[in-house]
Amino acid sequence: MGGTAPRGDATRWTTGLRLLAVGLLLLAACLCAGHARAEDGYDLWLRYHPLPAAQAGTYRSHVTQLIAGATTPTQVATRSELLRGLGGLLGQALPVADTASRDGALIIGTPVSSPLIAGLHLDMRALGREGYLIRSVVVNGHAATIIAGNDDIGVLYGAFRFLRLLQTAQPIARLDLRDWPRVKLRVLDHWDNLNGSVERGYAGASIWDWWKLPDWRAPRYTDYARANASIGINGAVLNNVNADPLILTHKYLEKVAALADVFRPYGIRVYLSVRFSAPIEVGGLKTADPLDPQVRRWWRTKADEIYKLIPDFGGFLVKANSEGQPGPQDYGRTHADGANALAAALAPHGGVVMWRAFVYANKPGTDRIKQSYNEFKPLDGKFAANVLLQVKNGPLDFQPREPFNPLFGAMPKTRLIMELQITKEYLGFATHLVYLGPLYQEALSADTMTRGKGSTVAKVVDGTLDGHALTGMAGVANIGADRDWCGSVFNQANWYVFGRLAWNPTLSARAIAEEWVRMTFSNDDAFVKPVVDMMMGSREAAVNYMTPLGLAHLMGHGHHYGPEPWDASGPRADWTPVYFHRADYAGIGFDRTATGSDAVAQYAPPVAREFASLQQIPDKYLLWFHHVPWDYRMRSGHTLWDELVMHYTHGVDAVKQMQRTWSSLKGYVDDERYRQVAAFLAIQLHEAQWWRDACIAYFQSINGLPLPVGYAPPAHSLKYYKSLSFKDVPGYSSW
């Protein structure tokens, strides 16, 4: 009030009416908003919004009370999640009871923690520690549902599965479900730096606030753990593989321990990326030679220090002798020597080493994609029992499409962990709608043929092909400090599908997409089907407008934003697009047959024969393995040049269709998320057109051929596209 002159009664009356009118409008908006209320994406797929009244009523008749222990941190987390989820979905708080006193009890626990479950004498031997059973039973004469496991963490996973059933409108009257993870280590790799930046991160700064840790444990850390547990992820590598050695100092280990405390109730172990030369940089030694006794002693002492702070510490992730990182080869040692030295330090504590196979050197005349196989294949069987070799899905570097990595199936005596990229470094960053489920499924279902037909990559990853119990999948995270976690709502689907496929690599990417859509947006089939169709076609659209027919690595140098197929300026040949597409007046593509680099020979003979044959190779891998004349006649009857232009154009047209699909669904989605997706699709269309036009302009400048009839020329000259410069691209780090 201070100093404000009193206003007349009429003015106050008018103001009051206006305020009342605004209040009534706001109230009406709240009452009418329903499923379309504004959302910012923070809840991810754990949106426990009230279900439609009829559906909620049906579920309420089957879930009338909760019987759950709360004597351990994981039990507390499980009960809390169920109360939160069921209360939100069913629209009313669920009473907690000690015994089943009426129909509809939801009973959760293990045979040890729950006498009611123990009394059922369930056979849960096949479930292991992390599996669960959800079953409709009769307890004390009353119909009930149980969520049971051999361990608290299995019960937590079962609780999330039960909530997923309700979120996706599944029947729960007669349940008999049992599930368990097929892969042991299901890990997110965060490429987060200690200064808060994120290499190849497109969702803002790092979520780890190292400055405020260990004293301030932000609530977001718990929500991160909840989200991961809901899809079965059980590990997190907190820092960049291009590691800062400071992470191993006691000051930072105390911060790591604080995060481990938050994650532990949700079954998530923390891991650290370590720099191989850390014994020199933070240990004061003069060498990091893995066979030097002082170095081995330093790693043992450091491991003891870590486990004293973090008893369930997972282990180390190591990038060594790759892209300038130090490693054992600096001392004339092998990768096995280096990995085994660290593994020996961790073994007494149950820790593992995940040693990345992403290595290559700038050797003139050597095909970059062959180098990882050449370095690691001879070391098969030489790694310690607690070492996993972390192998990218393809032999190059997370390109929109690659054939499967030939190391899968080629190292039967070595435990391999598959590395996938969730953050879309080469697929449009955060603003392109590209669902990666089809990419992951394509890699996992690929047949290595190393033990005959059916020797799929998935069977290598889950250990069934070679009899390994220590198995894993790792995903390079797309998580940042943005309110929606991933830079856009649809990017959340890639975090989700990674977790679900890491749990079971044989699941369907389409079925997972449908789950995610129902949990994230709506159960209305009129919305779900077109959105799932859009998602399932989005990856192929991106391949078409970026790198069709087996092309790869056409992006801008360093920042990886946009097309630069003309670039030959990198500090090393195999960082440049011209090295990979090898376009000249005669044709285009990288000859990897026996007449070229012979990379096909790294695959099992049946696969090698298919890839080496122009008659047998799928079109999608053609230019990856063959240098083909521009007038080569494709299976479609078109020339290669015409087919290339058509694919680029089809990619752009597919984005236009995605826009039309999304525009038709406005009434099903809250305005905030609808507008963000619409805006990002507009960006995607603009950049897809840019990719198409720049690549066509460049390749046409080499071959001098006309465009096929009816296909529009590039909007600008090649000189224009070459003039574009980008100095503010997010997510780029020079390490």
Image (spheres, rainbow, N blue to C red):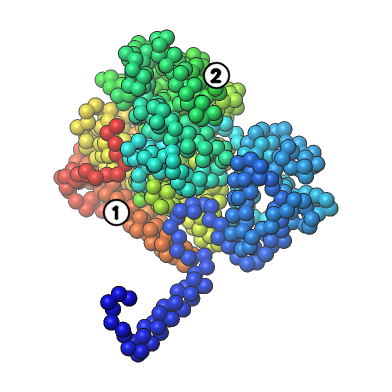
Q: Position of residue 720 (x, y in %)?
A: 17, 47
Residue placed farthest to the bottom in the image? 10
Q: Nearer the viewer, mark 1 or mark 2?
A: 2
The residues tagged by marks 1 and 2 sit, at their Cα atoms, a distance apart of 55 Å
Answer few, some or many: residues within 10 Å of disc 1's Cα (few below 14, many 20 plus, some between 14 and 19).
few
Q: Where residue 686 is drawn, which disc sits there? A: 1
For label 1, the SS is helix
**Residue 185 seen in the figure:** yes
Check the image and report above or below for 357 versus 36. Answer: above
Q: Residue at x 21, y 43 (%)?
A: 727
Task: Identify the amino acid type marked 2.
Answer: Pro
| Between 403 and 238, the one nearer to me in the picture | 238
Task: Identify the amino acid type marked 1.
Answer: His
The mark that comes first in sequence, 1 or 2, is: 2
Q: Position of residue 543 (x, y in %)?
A: 37, 43
Q: Position of residue 382 (x, y in %)?
A: 49, 14
Task: Examine the image and state in which quarter residue 255 appears.
Answer: top left
Residue placed farthest to the front in the image? 2
